[in-house]
C-alpha cells in the first residue's frame, strides 16, 4: 500500500490514478488448462517443450524420393522409379526408400528413411508400381524438417500476452496442457439507495430500478474480472458498512455506487475511512461527472464509491476503477479499442476550472471517419446511456472545443463497433421492422434514437442522423414532410424518400368505456388524455385536428386535461392508456393493437425517410432504402394494423426528378 492520500480536497485525475496504481494489489496467478485460457493474460514465458513438427514431414501430396535419383528429369526425359509403399498423416511408412524407389506420400506424413525430398503429384505419372517423374527435386524440397517451425526450448509466448484463439493454438502445438495465467480478480459490486429495486420488481411511487450494479458488473467482466453481487443496500450507515465488509471478505476489490455526495451525508466516505487503515485515500476527484467518487483501501484491497447517477457512475468507472480491475487481471490499463479518434461535429462547450467529460454519440461520415456529437445530459439513466458511445475530455481552462477539432473519444464499451447507420428521429414500429430486416440481413450495426419528427429534421441537419423517420403535417397545405425541408434549411442537404402510410387515431381502453367518438370529445371535460412530446409528428397532427375544430393549442392546454403531458413514443401513450393513467391518447393503430386497446381512426399520414445527401454513399443508408423498396419489408409492414406501402414507397419525392439507383 502506498502512503499517499488526498484528504478533504479534490484530487486531480492524475493524482487519483497515481494513488490507485500505488494501491492496486499485485495480480494473482493461477494455473489453468487450455480450455480455460481464452481472454486471459499469460503470467509466464512459455517455451516449447517439443520440436514442431516433431519429425520431417511432407508439405505436399506426392512421392518421397532420393533427390539424387531425379536429377536430369524433365518433361521430355522422365525418370522411372518404383513405388514401394505409401505414407499418410498419422500412418508413416516404416521401411526405407532405396535407390530408384519412391513412396507415395500425403501432406503431413513423415518422410520415410532414405528419402530426402518430395516430388509433387502433378509432376508425376503413375502406372501400377511404375512412377514417371517429370521434374527433378533438390534435397529438402517440399519437406518441413523437424523443429522447422519451433525448436524445443524456443520462446513461443511471453508473459503478459493476451490469449486469443491463435495463442491457444500456439500453446497446444508446443505441448502445453496447463499454463500459468493471471487470475480473474474477484470484484464485489453493490448499489446503495433506499429508492432502488431490482429490474424485475414492481415499483412503488418514488422507487427506481437499479441500473448501476448491472452496468458495473458487465464492465467488470469486460475488464477480465468476475463480479460478485452484493445486492442493493439501503441508505443506512451500518448496513452499508456491513456490505462493504462482506465485499472485502469475498473479493479482491469492492465497488459501490450511490451515497457519495455531500447531500447523501457522505456515508461512503465515513464507512470506508472507518474500515482502514489506510481508509480513505481520495475524497472526491476534480472531474465532472464523477466528482463525488471516493477511493479507499482496507485489508490490502481497494474500495471504490462511485456516484449514483448511471452515466456518471460508468464514466467514473472507466476513468478510475477500470484500471484497477484490468491491472489485477494482468491485462494492462487501457483496453484495446478503448478509444477512437473523431472530429467534433459541433462546438463542445467546456467549463473553465474543471476537467469535464462529456458523453458523445459517434456517427461515421461518408469517408469512414467518426463525427462526435455531444449528447444532452440530465440525470436520465437510459437515454444518455442509449445514445452515447463514449465521452470526450474537456481540459481544464479550455472554454470550448471548436467544431472540426480532432478529439479522442473514450468508448464506454471498449472494442465495440460504432454503428454503420445512425437513425435519429420519429419512432415507428414500421421503421423498427425495417431496421430489424437490415440488421439480420446485413449484420450491420444500427443505432436508433427516438427523438420525434422535428428532432429528426434537426438531427439530419446537424449530421447526427444519416436518416430520420419523419411525419410532419404542414397545417397550411395539408402536405406531409416536403414543406419542412426548406424550413429546416435542408434544401441542398437532404432528400426525402417516400416511406409508408400509417393510420393515426384515438386509443381508448378496450370496450371504449367513456364512449369516445372523435376529436371533439377531448373537449368534453370528463376525459384525461396523454399527449405526445412537443415536436413529435403525432402532436403536430393532433394540433392540426384541434385547429380544424377551432381550438388553438393555448385553449387546448386549458380545456383538455393532460394536453401538456409529453410521452415520447406511441408505445408509451398506449401503455399509459392501458394502465388507466389516461382515458385517451393519440397514436398509431399498430401501437393500440399491440396493447390491446380500441382504436378510433382519425387520419392517414405518410411516414417518410429524410436522408442526408452526403451520406447517400454509406452502405447502411443504401441498404435501408433497398429494404424499404423490397417485398419482404412490405410484407412485414402490412402485418401491422393500419400500415401499408404505396406505389411511391422507396421513391425520392424530394428533390423532384431525382432518381436514386442503389445497385
Ligand atoms: P446518490 O449518489 O445516491 O446521491 O444518487 C444520485 C442519483 O442517482 C439519484 O437520482 C439516485 O436515485 C440515482 N441512483 C443512485 N444509484 C443508482 C443505481 N444503482 N441505479 C440507478 N440510479 C441510481
Ligand atoms: Mg442514494
Image (spheres, rainbow, N blue to C red):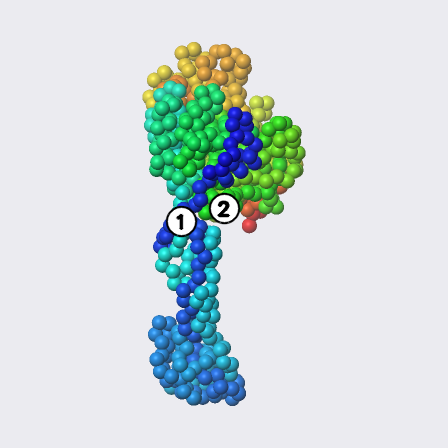
The residue indicated by pointer 1 is: 29
Between 660 and 203, the residue placed more toward the observer is 203
The mark closer to the camera, 2 or 1, is 1
Whether residue 375 sits left or right of residue 302 in the image: it is: right
Q: Is residue 500 visible?
A: no
Q: Looking at the rendering, which quadrant does residue 554 occupy?
A: top right
For the residues labelled 2 and 1, the Cα–Cα distance comes to: 15 Å
Q: For residue 363, what is the image quadrant?
A: top right
Place of residue 391 in the rendered image (x, y in percent of width and height, measured from the top left): 55, 35
Tell me the element at label 1: strand
Q: Position of residue 117 (x, y in %)?
A: 46, 79
Q: Residue at x 44, y 59 (%)?
A: 46
Residue position for label 2:
332
How packed mark 2 is, by other alpha carbons closer than 10 Å (few <14, some 14-19, many 20 or more), is some
Q: Secondary structure at mark 2?
A: loop
Q: Residues within 10 Å of mark 1 (few under 14, many from 20)?
A: some
Q: Left or right: 157 with respect to 376?
A: left
- Is the Cβ of the residue at disc 2 closer than 8 Å to that at disc 1? no
Q: Is residue 520 above or below residue 251?
A: above
- Which residue is painted at 49% across and 86% down in the image? 68
Compare residues 87 and 648 and report the one nearer the observer.
87
Q: What residue is drawn where x is 43% and y is 40%? A: 220
Task: Provide residue 90's location: percent of width, then percent of height.
Answer: 35, 72
Percent of width and height locating residue 617:
59, 45
Q: Quick one: 124 or 36, which is closer to the camera?
A: 36
- Residue 309 visible in the picture: yes
At horizontal 53% and vertical 16% (from top left) the residue drawn is 553
Amino acid at each position: 500500500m502506498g502512503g499517499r492520500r488526498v484528504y478533504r480536497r479534490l484530487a486531480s485525475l492524475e493524482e487519483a490514478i497515481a494513488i490507485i496504481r500505488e494501491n492496486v494489489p499485485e495480480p494473482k496467478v493461477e494455473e489453468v488448462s487450455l480450455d480455460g485460457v481464452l481472454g486471459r493474460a499469460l503470467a509466464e514465458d512459455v517455451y516449447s517443450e517439443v520440436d514442431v513438427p516433431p519429425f520431417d514431414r511432407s508439405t505436399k501430396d506426392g512421392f518421397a524420393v532420393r533427390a539424387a535419383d531425379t536429377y536430369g528429369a524433365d518433361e521430355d526425359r522422365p525418370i522411372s522409379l518404383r513405388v514401394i509403399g505409401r505414407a499418410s498423416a498419422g500412418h508413416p511408412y516404416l521401411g526405407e526408400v532405396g535407390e530408384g524407389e519412391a513412396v507415395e506420400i500425403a501432406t503431413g506424413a513423415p518422410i520415410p528413411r532414405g528419402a530426402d525430398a518430395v516430388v509433387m503429384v502433378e509432376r508425376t505419372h503413375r502406372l501400377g508400381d511404375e512412377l514417371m517423374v517429370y521434374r527433378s527435386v533438390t534435397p529438402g524440397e517440399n519437406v518441413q524438417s523437424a523443429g522447422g517451425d519451433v525448436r524445443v526450448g524456443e520462446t513461443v509466448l511471453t508473459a503478459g500476452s493476451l490469449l486469443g484463439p491463435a495463442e491457444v493454438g500456439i500453446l497446444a502445438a508446443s505441448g502445453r496442457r496447463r499454463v500459468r495465467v493471471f487470475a480473474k480478480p474477484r470484484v464485489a459490486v453493490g448499489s446503495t439507495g433506499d429508492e432502488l429495486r431490482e429490474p424485475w420488481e414492481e415499483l412503488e411511487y418514488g422507487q427506481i430500478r437499479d441500473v448501476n450494479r448491472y452496468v458495473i458488473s458487465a464492465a467488470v467482466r469486460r475488464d477480465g474480472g468476475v463480479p460478485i453481487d452484493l445486492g442493493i443496500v439501503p441508505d443506512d450507515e451500518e448496513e452499508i458498512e456491513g456490505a462493504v465488509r462482506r465485499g472485502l471478505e469475498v473479493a479482491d476489490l469492492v465497488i459501490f455506487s450511490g451515497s457519495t455526495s455531500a447531500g447523501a451525508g457522505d456515508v461512503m466516505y465515513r464507512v470506508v475511512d472507518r474500515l482502514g487503515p489506510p481508509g480513505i485515500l481520495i475524497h472526491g476527484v476534480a472531474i465532472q461527472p464523477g466528482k463525488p467518487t471516493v477511493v479507499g483501501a482496507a485489508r490490502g484491497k481497494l474500495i471504490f464509491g462511485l456516484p449514483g447517477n448511471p452515466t456518471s457512475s460508468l464514466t467514473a468507472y472507466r476513468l478510475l476503477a477500470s484500471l484497477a480491475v484490468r491491472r489485477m487481471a494482468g491485462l494492462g490499463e487501457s483496453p484495446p479499442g478503448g478509444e477512437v479518434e473523431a472530429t467534433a461535429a459541433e462546438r463542445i462547450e467546456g467549463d473553465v476550472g474543471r476537467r469535464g467529460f462529456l458523453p458523445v454519440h459517434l456517427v461515421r461520415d461518408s469517408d469512414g471517419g467518426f463525427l462526435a456529437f455531444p449528447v444532452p445530459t440530465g440525470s436520465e439513466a437510459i437515454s444518455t446511456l442509449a445514445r452515447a458511445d463514449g465521452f470526450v475530455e474537456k481540459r481544464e481552462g479550455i472554454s470550448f472545443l471548436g467544431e472540426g477539432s480532432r478529439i479522442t473519444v473514450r468508448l464506454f464499451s471498449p472494442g465495440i463497433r460504432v454503428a454503420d447507420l445512425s437513425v435519429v428521429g420519429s419512432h415507428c414500429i414500421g421503421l423498427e421492422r425495417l431496421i430489424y430486416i437490415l440488421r439480420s440481413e446485413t449484420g450491420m450495426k444500427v443505432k436508433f434514437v427516438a427523438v420525434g419528427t422535428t428532432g429528426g429534421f434537426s438531427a439530419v441537419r446537424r449530421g447526427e442522423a444519416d436518416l430520420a423517420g419523419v411525419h410532419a403535417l404542414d397545417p397550411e397545405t395539408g402536405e406531409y414532410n416536403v414543406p419542412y425541408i426548406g424550413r429546416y434549411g435542408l434544401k441542398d442537404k437532404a432528400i426525402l424518400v417516400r416511406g409508408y402510410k400509417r393510420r393515426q387515431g384515438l386509443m381508448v381502453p378496450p370496450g371504449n368505456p367513456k364512449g369516445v367518438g372523435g376529436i371533439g370529445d377531448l373537449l368534453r371535460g370528463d376525459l384525461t388524455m396523454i399527449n405526445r412530446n412537443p415536436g413529435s409528428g403525432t402532436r403536430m397532427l393532433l394540433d392540426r385536428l384541434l385547429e380544424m375544430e377551432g381550438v388553438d393549442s393555448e385553449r387546448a392546454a386549458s380545456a383538455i386535461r393532460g394536453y401538456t403531458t409529453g410521452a415520447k413514443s406511441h408505445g408509451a401513450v398506449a401503455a399509459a392508456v392501458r394502465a388507466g393513467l389516461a382515458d385517451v391518447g393519440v397514436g398509431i393503430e399498430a401501437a393500440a393493437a399491440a396493447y390491446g386497446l380500441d382504436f378510433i381512426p382519425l387520419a392517414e399520414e405518410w411516414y417518410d425517410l429524410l436522408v442526408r445527401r452526403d451520406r447517400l454513399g454509406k452502405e447502411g443508408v443504401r441498404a435501408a432504402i433497398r429494404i424499404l423498396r423490397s417485398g419482404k419489408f412490405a410484407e412485414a409492414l402490412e402485418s401491422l394494423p393500419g400500415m401499408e406501402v404505396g406505389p411511391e414507397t422507396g421513391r425520392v419525392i424530394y428533390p423532384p426528378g431525382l432518381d436514386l439507383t442503389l445497385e
